[in-house]
């Protein structure tokens, strides 16, 4: 008698639970006893079957490993479950239940006047801004690698000497490894090969004067729109790549349907004065730059 | 700063519950249609806990109403102006951008484009010192990836793959970052159109061992990183018919080991916290790896127990998961006497027989597994019939057409030609009386 067990109470066999317990060791497949297939008997039956022309081959079933593509209908439910998870997930700020109670304090780096009221915020600020600082010119960089490249290219006289004879300007993209004779060649490479935007701040030419500096600084900062926190404004300079003044480099490389990016930022908003631009990279020591 | 929290579908009070369920069903329908249109992509939302309260009213809205150009400009200005709320404003902007029309408006605005073409900066920050910033940049990149081929190719040209590889290597002990890298990578390689360029770059980058290593979940931290990395592995496995390299890097043994661990957890009643979110992609990796790596098999047959547990436990909440567990069982047992014997010895046949009564592809896959066992010879058929298989098959014959479609006939034939006397007679009887066209 057929019984449809819709409400089957699934009781897991206790042996299964034990098998999967952490105390159970591996059960190696090769150690499991197998019975050999009695081939001769099998073949005998096959011959019998073939005698009858009406018989459908009884060996239609073959054990078969099945492969399913990513977009196969077979996988629909699992994909839906996955995407519901992705879109439902709320990434919450892990506000501590007991946040450290400290009063406001200032960053202690000379020239930086940023205020904080959480240790976490300060840590983030410090890591972004003051950690990879060039001891020569006080510029800060977002990563150690860029800092090292900066020191090499700007503060190493041996580099300048070698650069006259061989390709020393390394591509900024990690893993690329190509080197170039001049920084302009490197910049072109970045634009052509790695789709960097043309107004990415490449090597600044040697300029002096604090006034120009300041203006450039503000322009730079205005350009960093995707910055997440206030500190990033200050980091604009950390790339150590300034705006290329040449308007010809404005042509964007991407094919997205948009009008060419205008180099000059056209923002009318006023940056609140509490935002500090003078951060760790004190601009006072520029005079020491060579060449 | 940002922590992924799984929002459990808690009841929001009886008044809202029905509405919530209805919305959820609508949302699910929309996702299914999107998948049929090959447009199933998702972006991950980051927001601060303060904002969460306001947004609770509408958590499952796939996209808000589109923004006007002025609103977009206003939002961008808000983000640029800095201050403490910058992060929240950015999160808000990101959420708004989930609406495709808003995206277009955003792209057309001047400031917006600067943000989009600022990818190199995002990539640079991945190697920065601030892990919170790294995590955020990763999610931004991950959300940008599914937008279009153009965006993906651009990111590829800018070196996203090696940036991700360095990032996960340097931050391998920071699970929040690992999860974010996994997410971004999965978004990058999910699309089929850039397979020829992106997948080889990924395989060559050295990121794969880290991805495989992250499959082992950290019980304290949660399943997030393992989930993301397993989906990455699934896309990698599916992109090639020869995965010997992945297998050499330990993909198969790792999947098997983790499934066994999870099987143990589930068997002991631990089914909370989204464990099935990890089981699911693991099954897919393993299932397809078994077909694309020659004859390499996992060594530990406790895997059979885990798969049986999943097929039973998830039968009602997630029948598709139950079915996919059986699929892996099929791939394991097809052509492997060790695993077939294993199923018999570990007394798992009754479970398979129980599953014969269920639809949605569960019974057909269970039949395949049983057929795989029967195929190995008389001895195996005897054991199968001793476990009550023929009786169960008779029961399912009430729906003859269904039975035929589900490979029941070949199974009977296998038993007929493999079994000893009595079973042969019984199988022959069933075939003669119910399937006269098949009998001799």
Image (cartoon, rainbow, N blue to C red):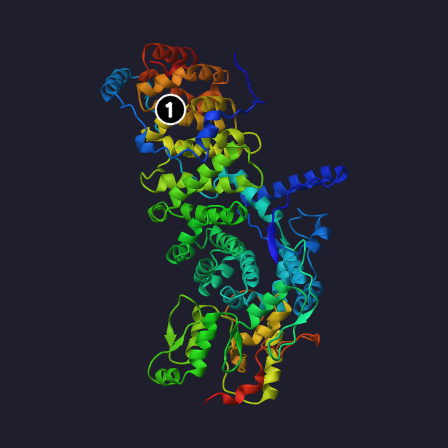
Residue B114 vs residue B308, the one in the foreground: B308
* Residue A128 drawn above or below residue A210: above
- Closer to us: A148 or B294: A148
| Res. A211 image quadrant | bottom right
State which quarter of the image contains the N terminus of chain B: bottom right
Q: Is residue A183 visible?
A: no
Callout 1: SS: helix
Which x, y percent locates residue B422?
Answer: 35, 9
Position in image of residue B145 (x %, y %): 52, 57
Q: Name the residue carrying label 1.
A: B345
Q: In the figure, A139 relative to B425: above or below?
A: below
In which quadrant will I find the C terminus of chain B? top left
Residue density around tag 1, few if under 14, some if 14–19, many if 20 or more, within 10 Å? few
Q: Residue at x 36, y 25 (%)?
A: B373
- In this picture, is B126 found above or below B12? below
Residue A277 visible in image: yes
Q: Return the chain for callout 1.
A: B
Q: Is residue A95 above or below residue A144?
A: above
- Residues A235 and B175: in front is B175
Estimate the x, y position of residue A280 in percent, counting from the top left: 58, 77
Residue A62, position as x, y percentages in the image: 34, 28
* Position of residue B282 in the picture relative to residue B273 (left or right): left
- Residue at the image point whose x is 46% and y is 89% from the top: A290
The single residue placed furthest to the right in the displayed view is: B15
What is the tally of numbered marks visible in this picture? 1
């Amino acid at each position: 008698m057929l019984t449809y067990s819709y409400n089957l109470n699934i009781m897991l066999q206790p042996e299964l639970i034990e098998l999967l317990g952490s105390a159970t060791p591996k059960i190696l497949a090769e150690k499991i006893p197998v019975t050999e297939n009695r081939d001769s008997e099998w073949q005998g039956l096959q011959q019998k079957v073939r005698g009858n022309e009406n018989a459908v081959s009884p060996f239609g079933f073959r054990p078969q490993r099945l492969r399913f593509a990513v977009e196969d209908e077979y996988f629909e439910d699992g994909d839906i479950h996955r995407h519901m998870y992705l879109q439902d997930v709320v990434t919450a700020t892990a506000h501590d239940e007991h946040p450290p109670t400290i009063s406001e304090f200032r960053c202690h780096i000379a020239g930086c006047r940023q205020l904080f009221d959480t240790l976490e915020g300060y840590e983030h600020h410090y890591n972004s801004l003051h950690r990879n600082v060039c001891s020569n010119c006080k510029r800060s960089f977002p990563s150690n690698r860029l800092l090292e490249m900066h020191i090499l290219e700007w503060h190493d006289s041996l580099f300048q000497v070698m650069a006259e004879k061989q390709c020393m300007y390394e591509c900024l993209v990690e893993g690329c490894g190509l080197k170039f004779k001049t920084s302009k060649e490197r910049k072109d490479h970045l634009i052509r090969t790695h789709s960097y935007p043309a107004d990415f701040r490449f090597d600044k030419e040697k300029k002096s004067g604090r006034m120009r500096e300041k203006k450039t600084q503000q322009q730079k900062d205005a350009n960093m729109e995707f910055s997440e926190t206030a500190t990033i404004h200050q980091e604009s300079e950390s790339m150590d790549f300034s705006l290329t003044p040449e308007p010809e480099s404005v042509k964007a490389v991407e094919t997205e349907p948009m009008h060419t990016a205008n180099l000059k930022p056209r923002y009318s908003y006023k940056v609140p004065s509490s935002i500090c631009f003078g951060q760790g990279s004190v601009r006072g020591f520029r005079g020491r730059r060579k060449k | 700063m940002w922590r992924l929290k799984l929002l459990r579908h808690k009841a929001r009070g009886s008044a809202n519950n029905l509405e919530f369920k209805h919305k959820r069903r609508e949302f699910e329908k929309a996702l299914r249609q999107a998948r049929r249109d090959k447009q199933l992509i998702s972006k991950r939302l980051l927001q601060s806990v303060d904002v969460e309260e306001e947004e609770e009213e509408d958590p499952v809205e796939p996209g808000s109403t589109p923004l006007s150009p002025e609103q977009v400009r206003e939002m961008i200005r808000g983000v640029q102006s800095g201050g403490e709320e910058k992060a929240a404003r950015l999160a808000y902007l990101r959420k708004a951008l989930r609406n495709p029309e808003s995206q277009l408006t955003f792209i057309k605005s001047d400031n917006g484009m600067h943000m989009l073409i600022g990818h190199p900066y995002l990539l640079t920050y991945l190697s920065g010192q601030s892990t919170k910033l790294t995590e955020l940049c990763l999610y931004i990149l991950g959300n940008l990836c599914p937008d279009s081929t153009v965006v993906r190719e651009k990111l590829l040209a800018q070196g996203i793959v090696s940036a991700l590889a360095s990032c996960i290597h340097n931050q391998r002990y920071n699970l929040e970052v690992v999860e974010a890298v996994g997410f971004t990578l999965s978004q990058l390689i999910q699309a089929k159109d850039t397979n020829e360029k992106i997948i080889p770059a990924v395989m060559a980058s050295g990121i794969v061992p880290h991805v495989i290593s992250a499959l082992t979940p950290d019980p304290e931290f949660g399943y997030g990183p393992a989930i993301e990395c397993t989906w990455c592995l699934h896309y990698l496995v599916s992109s090639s018919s020869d995965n010997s390299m992945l297998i050499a890097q330990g993909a198969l043994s790792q999947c098997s080991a983790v499934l066994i661990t999870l099987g143990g957890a589930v068997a002991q009643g631990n089914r909370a916290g989204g464990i099935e979110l990890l089981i699911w992609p693991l099954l897919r990796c393993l299932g397809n790896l078994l077909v694309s790596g020659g004859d390499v098999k996992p060594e530990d047959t406790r895997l059979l127990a885990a798969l049986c547990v999943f097929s039973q436990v998830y039968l009602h909440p997630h029948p598709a998961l139950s079915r996919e567990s059986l699929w892996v069982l099929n791939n394991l047992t097809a052509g492997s006497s060790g695993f077939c014997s294993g199923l018999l010895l570990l007394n798992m046949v009754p479970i398979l027989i129980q599953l014969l009564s269920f639809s949605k592809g569960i019974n057909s896959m269970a039949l395949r597994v049983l057929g795989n066992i029967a195929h190995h010879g008389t001895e195996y058929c005897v054991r199968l019939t001793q476990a009550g298989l023929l009786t169960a098959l008779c029961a399912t014959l009430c729906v003859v057409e269904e039975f035929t479609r589900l490979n029941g006939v070949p199974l009977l034939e296998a038993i007929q030609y493999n079994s000893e006397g009595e079973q042969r007679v019984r199988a022959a009887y069933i075939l003669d009386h119910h399937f006269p066209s098949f009998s001799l």
